[in-house]
Amino acid sequence: QVQLVESGGGLVQPGGSLRLSCAASGSIFIINTMAWYRQAPGKQRELVASHTRGSVREYADSVKGRFTISRDNAKNTVYLQMNSLKSEDTAVYYCNADRHTPWDTTTTYWGQGTQVTVSS
């Protein structure tokens, strides 16, 4: 099992910044892709940004130029720096990680979510 613990959410004014962190622990073996998703009330969960172990990054169009995903493989931690926040960024943000085992299985794990609210 892998546990993902997120931190860094909160209330911020429009135009402000927040940094989310997600640390993986447990029977990690190799963590391949780590990603951030978000889910706003009444909407489907959507991919915000992803970061492969080989440092390939992808972003949703809505956050390009404002959000930056980074990763520390030694700490099995992924970060999401969110700048120029907008009200439409308000959502619960979830960390996601794909674990690969020596016996060639891949399992996806989710964090518990952290609330980000952008409001004046």
Image: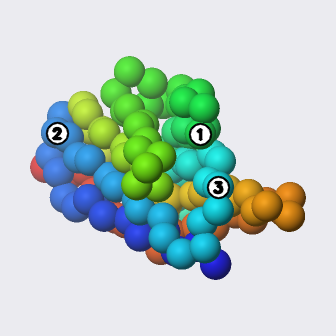
Q: Is residue 90 visible?
A: no
Q: Nearer the viewer, mark 1 or mark 2?
A: 1
Q: Is residue 103 visible?
A: yes
Q: Is residue 98 left or right of residue 73?
A: right
Marks 1/2 in contact by CB < 8 Å: the verdict is no
Tell me, for residue 30, which label it has, or none. 3
Query: Could you tell me which secondary element the residue under label 1 belongs to?
Result: loop
Query: Could you tell me which secondary element the residue under label 3 belongs to?
Result: strand
* Residue picked out by circle 1: 53
**Residue 110: image x %, image y %?**
58, 67
Tell me, for residue 16, which label it has, or none. 2
Marks 1/3 in contact by CB < 8 Å: the verdict is yes
**Identity of the residue drawn at 43% across and 42% down:** 71
- Of labels 3 and 2, earlier in sequence is 2
**Residue 67: image x %, image y %?**
37, 33
Label 2: how many residues lie within 10 Å, few (<14), some (14-19) or many (20+)? some
- Of labels 1 and 3, earlier in sequence is 3
